[in-house]
Amino acid sequence: MPRESFAIGSVRIRPGTTREVGLPITRLVTGSEVSLPVRVVHGRHDGPTIWVTAATHGDEVVGIEAVRRVLAALDPKAFRGTLVAVPIVNVLGFTAGDRYLPDRRDLNRSFPGSARGSLAARIAHLLMAEVISRGDVGIDLHTGAFGRTNLPQIRADLDDPRTLALAQAFGAPVILHARLRDGSLRAAARERGCAVLVYEGGEAWRFDEWAIEAAVAGVRRVLAALEMTDPVDEQPPSPSLISRQSSWVRARRTGILQLDAVLGQRVEAQERLGGLSDSFGKRLRLVHAAGPGVVIGRTTAPLVNRGDALVHIAVEEDGHDV
């Protein structure tokens, strides 16, 4: 028996086809309509439904390119199940060159939203109703905030066996156990029974190729693990390092930062990571690791104030890779 068509918005997508849909969000003062861009790959064969989202923060562009590359390689006639991709969730922030919405709200703290709430609440409600509620599995693609860069990593609930298995299938260098944040897309999706992976990699407003490649490879591996596509023809990635604890090394003085620590570097307690100097180069303070671990994030800012986050270090679970 052939699969049923997939309904989203006001359209239905036939099995074995791909279609782009614009879900209306709002109208600008000019009268122009702003829509949420969605592409649905509705496979000819039965399988799970997965959603992939990017640019929930308008300045996080790595995921936009990753979604494009994943979609370009999919054949709906051979695909098993359904993929719903939203490459730019925060359309207004992205077009304005801003992380947030015009009212300065953080969209990723506005879920599950409301049909009659603020602009952020309405966008969140639309995404939940039309995309998130349809999925069995979701992958939300992010980067570091402005002035920070992240090692490719998955953040997820590692106490859920299904989510852990998917995180390991993704194959990022690090898997970090992360608590749910109120108002986040991940928290709202979990409430609806969806297994969610949050990918972090690269820097805001940068097409960091290494972060894009890691995201594309990870999404493809998850699709293969769910048997939606054939197994990925590649050299298996190294086992991910699992961490349940991480912390930031913070500046103890205001100064110009010379940071030697690089992403993925293993460090020991009290290892030197860099230093702070004044404008004439006089050393003000050295920066040391508080404990052992792996560098999964770092600032890219040259000027830091006392208390600013400098280096994000994840502690290996039991001191072993898995």
Image: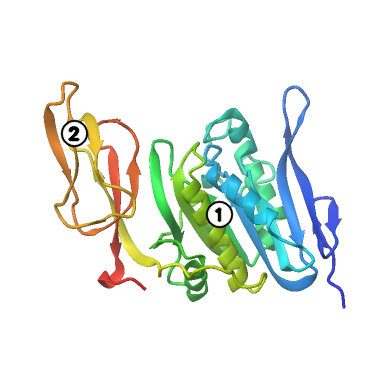
Q: Is residue 127 left or right of residue 320?
A: right
Q: Secondary structure at mark 2?
A: strand
Estimate the x, y position of residue 138 in percent, counting from the top left.
59, 61
Residue at coordinates 15% horizontally, 25% vertically from top-left? 281
Q: Can residue 197 be seen in the rendering of this structure?
A: yes
Mark 1 vs 2: CB contact within 8 A: no
Q: Which residue is mark 2?
A: 276
Disc 2 crowd rating (10 Å Cα; few below 14, some 14-19, many 20+) is many
Q: Is residue 126 left or right of residue 96?
A: right
Q: Amino acid at mark 2?
A: Leu
Residue 36 versus residue 107: which sits nearer the camera? Answer: 36
Residue at coordinates 81% horizontally, 58% vertically from top-left? 7
Residue 46 picture quarter: bottom right
Q: Secondary structure at mark 1?
A: strand
Disc 1 crowd rating (10 Å Cα; few below 14, some 14-19, many 20+) is many
Q: Can residue 188 be seen in the rendering of this structure?
A: no
Residue 84 picture quarter: bottom right
Estimate the x, y position of residue 240 in percent, counting from the top left.
40, 67
Q: How many marks?
A: 2
Q: Which residue is mark 1?
A: 140
Quadrant location of the N terminus in the rendered image: bottom right
Task: Note whether 198 is above or below 236 in the view shown.
Answer: above
Q: CA distance from mark 1 to mark 2?
A: 35 Å
Residue at coordinates 72% horizontally, 49% vertically from top-left? 38
